[in-house]
Image (cartoon, rainbow, N blue to C red):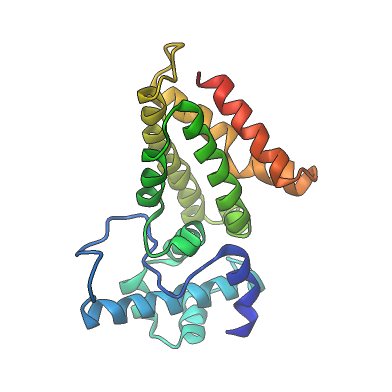
Amino acid sequence: MERYANLVKTTGIQSDPGTRSGPRSGPRSGPRPLRQAQADATRSLIVAAAGQLFTERGYVGTSIAAIAREAGVAVQTIYNTVGNKAAVLSAILDAAASGPNAPIPVPEFMKERTDHASDFEAVADVLAEWFVEVHDRTAPVFSMIRQAAAVDGDAAELERARAAQRLRHYELAAAAIRARGGLSSGMTDPEAAAVILAIGHPEVYRTLVHGRGWTTAAYRKWVRIGLTSALA
C-alpha cells in the first residue's frame, strides 16, 4: 500500500493494531495464540486500507465495500473485526495515538509516565510532552473526523465520544496532580480535567502550530505554563 505511506509516516500507525482504546484480553507477555495474531493482522490491514482511502477519497466517499476490496477481506470481516465505518475511523485514531508505543494502549503507557513524575510540575511536563507528541501524529486523523462529523451522524457521535473519553482520561491526570500537591485552589478533578482538555485540545494545537506557525517548542512551553498556572 505505497499510497498510504505518507499517512503511516505522519500518524505512526503500526503493523500491530492492538492500539484500540478498549480493554485487551489475555496476557501481554509471551506468544499470542495464532487465532489472535491472525485477527490482529486482519485488523491492521483494514485500518491501513481505510486510512489510505479516507485520505484519497474522503470519509463520505469511501464505502465499507471499498475498504474491504483494498484490504483484501470480506465486507462482513470488517464489521466483525472492527465495526461500522465510524468504528474504523476510531481505530485509525487509536493506532495513530499509540504510534511507536503500540500495541500498548495510550492510557496504560501514559499512566506509567505519570507514575514516574515526582511532583506536580513533572506531571505538567509529561502532559506537555505528550500533547506535542500525539498531536503531531493525530492531526491528519482529527481533520478526517472533523470533516466527517459535519456530514455524518455516526462520525459526529464518534467525535463527541472521543472528547468524553479524553475527559475521563484527564481526570486520572488530575488525580495525579492532586496527589503531588496541585489543585490547591479547591478545583475538583473533573474541573481540572476540563482545563487539561481545553489547553491540550487538538484544535488548539492545530490553530497555534499549523495556523499561526508556532514551533513545537513554543507550544510545549505554553502548555506547561498554562497547566502549572491553572492547576497549582
| Residue 95 falls left or right of residue 35 | right
Is residue 147 among what the camera can see? no
Quarter containing the N terminus:
bottom right
Up-down relation of residue 44 to residue 146 (above or below):
below
* Residue at position x 36%, y 46% in the image: 112
Camera-side residue: 185 or 42?
185
Residue 18 point in image, percent of width and height:
36, 66
Is residue 88 among what the camera can see? yes
* Residue at position x 38%, y 23% in the image: 178
In this view, the residue farthest toward the top is: 185
Up-down relation of residue 140 to residue 70 (above or below):
above
Residue 229, picture quadrant: top right
In this view, the residue farthest toward the front is: 118
Number of marks present in the image shown: 0
| Residue 40 falls left or right of residue 63 | left
Camera-side residue: 204 or 115?
115
Camera-side residue: 174 or 75?
174
Up-down relation of residue 66 to residue 171 (above or below):
below
Residue 109 point in image, percent of width and height:
39, 51
Residue 80 point in image, percent of width and height:
31, 73
Residue 65 point in image, percent of width and height:
47, 80
Camera-side residue: 48 or 111?
111
